[in-house]
Amino acid sequence: MKKLVCNMCGEDMDEYDVQQRFKYYSIPGYGSEFDSHKVELDLCSKCMDELFKKCKINPVGEGLYN
């Protein structure tokens, strides 16, 4: 199995992180400094939580059981 590393903290992902894998993929368009570059982001659970906490507008919707 390929080893996954968190893009934010640089740590190897453990079994739990691999199962919960938070992956973002995009090709930003005009106006971005990364215009037309492929962007792939893998985050461990800890970094995903930290990223969400930094957002001014909460990106988390209702839970599966609400």
Image: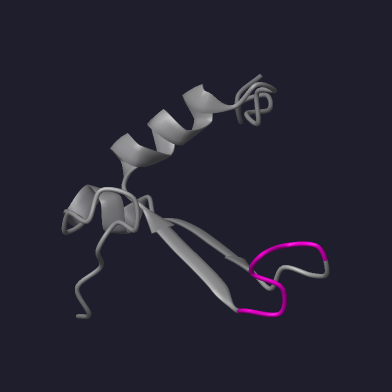
Residue at (71, 80) in percent of width and height: 36
How many numbered circles are shown?
0
Along the line of sight, which residue is nearer the eye, 41 or 61? Answer: 41
Is residue 2 covered in magenta?
Answer: no
Magenta range: 31-37
Along the line of sight, which residue is nearer the eye, 32 or 23? Answer: 32
Residue at (83, 69) in percent of width and height: 30
**In the rendered image, which quarter contains the C terminus?**
top right
Return the x and y of residue 12 as percentages of the image width and height.
16, 59
Return the x and y of residue 60 as percentages of the image width and height.
62, 28
Q: Is residue 2 left or right of residue 8?
A: left
Along the line of sight, which residue is nearer the eye, 64 or 39? Answer: 39
In the rendered image, the vertical position of residue 55 relative to residue 5, given as above or below: above
**In the rendered image, which quarter contains the N terminus?**
bottom left
Residue at (32, 55) in percent of width and height: 19
Is residue 33 covered in magenta?
Answer: yes
Q: Main secondary structure of the magenta part?
A: loop
Residue at (25, 48) in percent of width and height: 9
In the rendered image, the vertical position of residue 19 relative to residue 28, given as above or below: above
**Coloring applied to the structure:** one colour
Farthest residue, direction right? 30
Return the x and y of residue 22 as percentages of the image width and height.
45, 53
Return the x and y of residue 20 as percentages of the image width and height.
37, 50
In the rendered image, the vertical position of residue 42 relative to residue 3, given as above or below: above
Q: Is residue 41 left or right of residue 64?
A: left
Name the quadrant containing residue 58: top right
Q: Is residue 11 left or right of residue 38?
A: left
